[in-house]
Image (cartoon, rainbow, N blue to C red):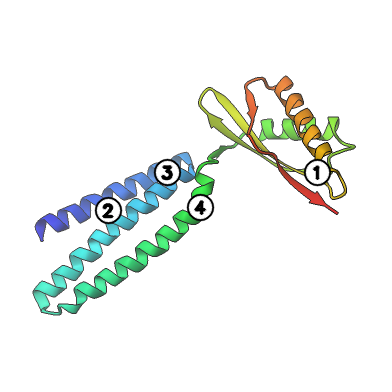
Amino acid sequence: MIVLAGASALSLHRAFQMRKIANKFNLLSLKTDARNSIKDGSASVIGFFSILVATQFGFVQIDAIGGMIIAGYIFSVSYISLKRSSLILVDSWQNPELTDMIKKIISERFSNEVLNVKNVLLRSAGMVDQAEIHIEFSGDTPLSDIEILSLRIEMAIRSKFPLLKKYPLFLIHLLK
């Protein structure tokens, strides 16, 4: 019981330290890992209390009830983690000046072809930075024209920001 209590306390303490660091750097990947660590630490605490009640008060069914509580908690945290797992790959960093400049370049140079720049997400990838750009086009624009236009937009952005690489995918919204 002493080992279980110590491991539970240490695990929960470490999890809350991770959460503090994750909130400080505001990265989704760290936040998800911290949430998972809190789940592990709280599962240890629930396990400790269910074993404590089972051994001290003779209510042996509490161990199974504690296991079901832990299973439900693991499922809920896993569901949330799985739902957000795609966003971990896009840990974007915020630079409002750069995103505004990219939007301005696209709006000025391609105002006849582009209806709207929805948003620009920036992501650091080693020595280069990447941009994911969400653009709205008219619904009657041919796909071949959109592909050519996206390459022209990429070249315009790269000419202004040589270290900024286009993320491999432009997200395109077609409006009718």
Disc 2 versus disc 3: distance between alpha carbons? 16 Å
Q: Which residue carries the number 1 mark?
A: 116
Q: Which residue carries the number 2 mark?
A: 12
Q: Amino acid at mark 3?
A: Leu
State which quadrant residue 116 falls in: top right
In the structure shown, which secondary structural element does the residue marked by tag 3 occupy? helix
Disc 4 versus disc 3: distance between alpha carbons? 12 Å
Q: Residues within 10 Å of mark 1 (few under 14, many from 20)?
A: some
Where, quadrant-wise, is the N terminus in this rendering? bottom left
Q: Which residue carries the number 3 mark?
A: 30
Q: Amino acid at mark 4?
A: Arg
Q: Residue at 51% x, 52% y: name it.
A: 84
Is tag 1's residue or tag 2's residue first in the polypeptide sequence?
2
Is tag 1's residue or tag 3's residue first in the polypeptide sequence?
3
Where, quadrant-wise, is the C terminus in this rendering? bottom right
Disc 4 versus disc 1: distance between alpha carbons? 27 Å
